[in-house]
Amino acid sequence: MGRYIARKRARFHSFGREVNIPWGAVLEEQDGSLFWKGKLLCSVTSQNAYDYFSRDDDGLGKLRGQLVGAIKDRLEKRDKEYQARWNKVWADPKCQQYKRPEHEDWWVWNYDFYNAPIPDLQYIAALVGAGRG
């Protein structure tokens, strides 16, 4: 059994019910699914898991979530440096290990990115100018 943490408030529909999970809430992972208060929410590989939750088995889930959020926010910012940041990501070997290979023409972060070791996320954050989250 694993542990995840809500890295931001999670509001979505799950199995026909509205979910509203506060920031910092602890979720349990069992057999690849996330549970909150004993109720099944989603798969650990679902978009909802990627958008709202961070693995916390090592006690670093809050920091992992901050870094993931900071990286994604920085890369989504449409300013004059937008393409330059993405060019760095596309060219970087460390980043390549976190790209889903089935998408050749655009970047989609894979499961491993959302569960990456803190030093890797700090590296990517520094690469794109996101700081430490």
Image (spheres, helix red, strand yellow):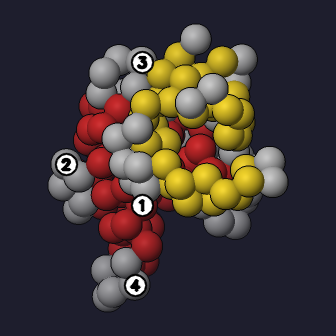
Q: Which mark is residue 78?
A: 4
Residue in the foreground of this view, choosing between 95 and 32: 32
Q: Position of residue 130 (x, y in %)?
A: 25, 59
User: Residue 87, located in which quarter of the rendered image?
Assistant: bottom left
C-alpha distance separating marks 3 and 2: 20 Å
Dot placed on the residue nearer the N-terminal end, 1 or 3: 3
Residue at disc 3, secondary structure: loop
Q: Residue furthest top?
A: 1
Dot placed on the residue nearer the N-terminal end, 1 or 4: 1
- Which mark's residue is nearer the viewer, 3 or 2? 3
Label 2 Cα neighbours within 10 Å, binned few <14 / some 14-19 / many ≥20 = some
Q: Is residue 29 left or right of residue 71?
A: right
Q: Tag 4: residue type? A: Arg
Q: Tag 2: residue type? A: Arg
Q: Is residue 43 left or right of residue 21?
A: right
Residue under pointer 3: 57
Residue in the foreground of this view, choosing between 73 and 44: 44
Q: How many marks?
A: 4
Q: Tag 1: residue type? A: Lys
Residue under pointer 2: 132
Dot placed on the residue nearer the N-terminal end, 3 or 4: 3
Residue in the foreground of this view, choosing between 101 and 93: 101
Q: Position of residue 64 (x, y in %)?
A: 34, 38
Q: Quadrant of the N terminus?
A: top right
